């Protein structure tokens, strides 16, 4: 397919210009015209939902795209219907293509549109300055769908202008529009169906009568993403400067723009974006400035977006915990956060209750999601700092490096203890935990309703404890950290939190939404190496805890014997058996 | 905290990196990040994927969501017929 990368096309350049009034089709009554167009679009949408456009006539397929939406001659509903149809078309086409086929007529319409035969891109862009925010939002979704469906035929010129518009416009809504379109492209994943969507159902297939063309399912959107990231890279320093000035002169008018920018930044460096680490390296610059933006004057919604971004940079459970050599950028950020908590009262500025004073002062329930994001960031920063010094906590072959690291570790231990003390103080000031509850235990209680953050925070506590306290070569004199971070106490509290139900553990192992595989693997290694301490910590609950592990082992065994476990669970299975043997030896 | 940066000299870091380089490296096919153990790479690569499925132990059919699998499992449960209990598979 060859697209007209038309020099004649001048998309996006007119974004800042006022919307021009379009001429009505001569000789046709306005109401009649609207009714007929609406009818065509209804038919178009209905057929799209049935996955096929074969039954529509050429004229009724073309008619909806012949006229152009404008502020004056189209009603809001008509614009929304038009834009919604474009979005639906793009989504259905992408979904079909990723499954290896496309309805020939859907393919034709998409091809005509991506050639920009109807100037569709300009029309969608014009809507970014529409007075109705729903229209702007719908247009941004349709435009991102349009660019994604263009796949390898996407014209970089469109993306360049989009990024340029985000930079040059003085209208917050237009900047938000451009950033949102780019974010959706960066974030897009093939086969990313809605959670409520059951794939493979009858409603997902075109009817028998449809003229279906085979497509290359490997022809994905990675090229559009790649072009998008390259285009952004060139403009990134200027965009960050603009973002900094928006935050420093913050008004609620800029809220959506600031949040969208942070979401885009997060999407760019997210492990889930499946972008190469080399391509995303430029986006790790300027992060130190972002930490300094965390001040009481910044509203909680912006705090949360900043914390989401920083938590994504410290991708501990998915990546950093598994690497022997950590990249410099996350380490530098971790140092900054540790220093911020220890020396610069970073936690004091948390707008927990949205008032003034320490932790946001005021009254009310407080913003628990905000607190959880902050706690997770501090725990990750601590774990990264320890990991960086320790090199590789799980590799016993590096004993000589571990010896060298001991000296460094002793030096940072005091700082980490101070950071954890301040974190403990902050959490207990805001949430009614018993004053004697150690971090190892309240971390499970605090995150109990959010499994991904819960398990990542447990991994952080475990790795920090193993790195600082359970080093073979060091005789520990101070036992404070051993109690504060006790991995056995965390695991026992976790087993209580899941009501001693091994099925929950199995679900967490099978799913990839959390880093539970890593947590269980390292916890079992810890239990095996520190069996006596584990028994002591369990006390009267030892039988209950071990019953959960034994039932989990049996469930995994059953699945493995039928070859149904989705990946190699062997190492976990062997550790479970070893722990079980130690328990049996103990009880005998 | 500050001491790390004083102790972690460039020479030490370079020496450490040299040691690490001699080890086997396993590279993520999605983001090209490097890992020294294959199992660590496998754990990491799972976080890139969206294709986790829940598989029925009885017939092997896969589901994107666990509640759909639970609902599906009921078709394998014994049901009462005129001739007694039978199993639907």
Image (cartoon, rainbow, N blue to C red):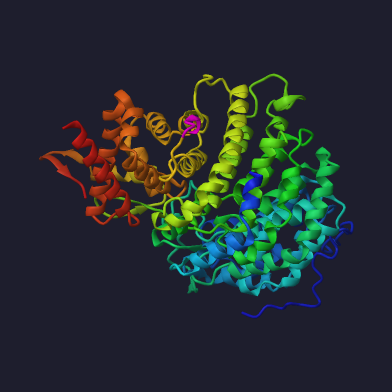
Q: Position of residue A152 (x, y in %)?
A: 62, 73
The location of residue A188, given as percent across then percent down, is 59, 58
For residue A489, above or below residue A311: above
Query: Would residue A352 be found to the left or right of residue A382 on screen?
Result: right
| Residue reaching furthest to the bottom | A2
Res A376 → quadrant: top right
Farthest left residue in view: B83
> Is residue A478 inside the magenta stretch?
yes
Left or right position of A79 against A454: right
User: Residue visible at 72% across and 44% down?
Assistant: A291
- Type of secondary structure dominating the magenta stretch: loop
Quadrant for the C terminus of chain A, please: top left
Q: Position of residue A569 (x, y in %)?
A: 32, 53
User: Looking at the picture, does residue A347 appear above or below residue B23?
Assistant: above
Q: Which residue does the image show at 58% across and 68% down from the upper left? A: A222
- The quarter of the rendered structure image containing the N terminus of chain A is bottom right
- Position of A381 with respect to A533 (left or right) is right
Task: Name the residue nearer the viewer: A572 or A38.
Answer: A572
Q: How many marks?
A: 0
Query: In the rendered structure, which segment of residues is drawn in magenta?
Result: A477-481
Res. A77 in view: no
Q: Nearer the viewer, residue A467 or A510?
A: A467
Residue A568 appears in the figure? yes
Residue A132 vertical position relative to residue A342 in the rendered view, above or below: below
Q: Depth check: give the residue in front, A89 or A242.
A: A242
Residue A321, percent from left and from top: 49, 51
Residue A516 image-quadrant placement: top left
- Residue A537 magenta-highlighted: no
- Would residue A480 appear left or right of A90 to someone viewing this image? left
In depth, the one of A530 and A136 nearer the eye is: A530
């Amino acid at each position: 397919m060859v697209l007209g990368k038309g020099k004649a096309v001048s998309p996006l350049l007119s974004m800042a210009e006022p919307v021009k009034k379009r001429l009505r089709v001569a000789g046709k009554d306005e109401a009649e015209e609207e009714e007929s167009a609406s009818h065509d679009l209804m038919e178009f949408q209905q057929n799209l939902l049935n996955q096929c456009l074969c039954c529509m006539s050429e004229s009724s397929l073309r008619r909806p795209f012949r006229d152009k939406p404008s502020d004056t001659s189209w009603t809001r509903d008509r614009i929304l219907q038009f834009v919604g149809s474009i979005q639906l078309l793009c989504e259905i086409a992408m979904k079909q293509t990723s499954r290896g086929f496309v309805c020939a007529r859907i393919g034709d319409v998409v091809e005509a549109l991506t050639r920009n035969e109807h100037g569709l891109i300009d029309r969608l862009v014009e809507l970014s300055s529409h007075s109705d925010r729903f229209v702007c939002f719908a247009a941004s979704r349709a435009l991102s769908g349009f660019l994604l469906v263009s796949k390898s035929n996407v014209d970089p010129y469109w993306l360049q202008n989009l990024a340029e518009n985000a930079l040059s416009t003085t209208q917050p809504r237009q900047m938000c529009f451009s950033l949102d379109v780019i974010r959706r492209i960066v974030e897009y994943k093939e086969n990313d169906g809605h959670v409520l969507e059951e794939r493979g159902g009858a409603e997902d297939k075109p009817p028998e009568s449809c003229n279906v063309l085979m497509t290359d399912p490997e022809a994905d959107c990675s090229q559009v993403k790649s072009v998008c990231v390259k285009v952004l890279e060139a403009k990134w320093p200027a965009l960050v400067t603009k973002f900094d000035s928006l935050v420093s002169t913050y008004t609620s008018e800029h809220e959506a723009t600031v949040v969208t920018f942070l979401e885009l930044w997060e999407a760019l460096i997210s492990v889930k974006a499946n972008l190469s680490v080399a391509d995303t390296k430029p986006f790790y610059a300027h992060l130190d400035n972002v930490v300094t933006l965390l001040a009481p004057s910044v509203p909680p919604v912006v705090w949360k977006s900043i914390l989401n971004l920083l938590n994504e940079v410290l991708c501990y459970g998915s990546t950093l915990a598994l690497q022997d050599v950590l990249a410099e950028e996350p380490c530098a950020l971790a140092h900054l956060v540790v220093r911020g908590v220890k020396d610069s009262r970073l936690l004091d500025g948390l707008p927990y209750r949205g008032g003034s004073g320490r932790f946001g002062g005021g009254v009310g329930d407080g913003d628990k999601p905000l607190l959880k994001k902050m706690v997770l960031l501090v725990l990750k920063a601590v774990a990264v700092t320890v990991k960086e010094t320790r090199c590789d906590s799980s590799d016993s072959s590096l004993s000589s490096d571990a010896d060298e690291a001991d000296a460094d570790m002793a030096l940072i231990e005091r700082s980490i203890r101070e950071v954890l003390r301040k974190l403990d103080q902050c959490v207990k000031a805001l949430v009614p935990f018993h004053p004697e509850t150690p971090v190892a235990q309240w971390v499970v209680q605090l995150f109990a309703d959010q499994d991904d953050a819960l398990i990542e925070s447990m991994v952080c506590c475990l790795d920090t404890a193993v790195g600082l306290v359970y080093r073979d070569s060091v005789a520990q004199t101070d036992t404070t950290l051993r109690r504060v971070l006790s991995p056995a106490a965390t695991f026992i509290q976790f087993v209580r939190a899941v009501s001693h139900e091994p099925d929950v553990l199995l679900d967490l192992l099978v799913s990839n939404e959390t880093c539970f595989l890593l947590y269980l693997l390292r916890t079992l290694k810890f239990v095996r190496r520190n069996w006596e301490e584990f028994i002591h910590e369990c006390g009267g609950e030892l039988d209950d805890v071990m019953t959960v592990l034994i039932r989990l082992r049996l469930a995994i065994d059953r699945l493995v014997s039928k070859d149904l476990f989705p990946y190699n669970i062997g190492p976990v299975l062997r550790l479970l058996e070893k722990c079980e043997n130690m328990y049996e030896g103990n009880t005998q | 905290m500050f001491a790390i940066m004083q102790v972690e000299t460039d020479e030490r870091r370079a020496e450490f990196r040299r040691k690490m380089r001699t080890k086997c490296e396993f590279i993520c096919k999605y983001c090209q990040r490097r890992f020294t153990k294959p199992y660590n790479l496998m754990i990491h690569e799972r976080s890139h994927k969206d294709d986790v499925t829940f598989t029925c132990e009885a017939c092997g059919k896969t589901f994107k969501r666990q509640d759909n699998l639970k609902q599906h499992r009921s078709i394998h449960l014994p049901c009462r017929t005129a001739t007694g209990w039978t199993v639907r598979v």
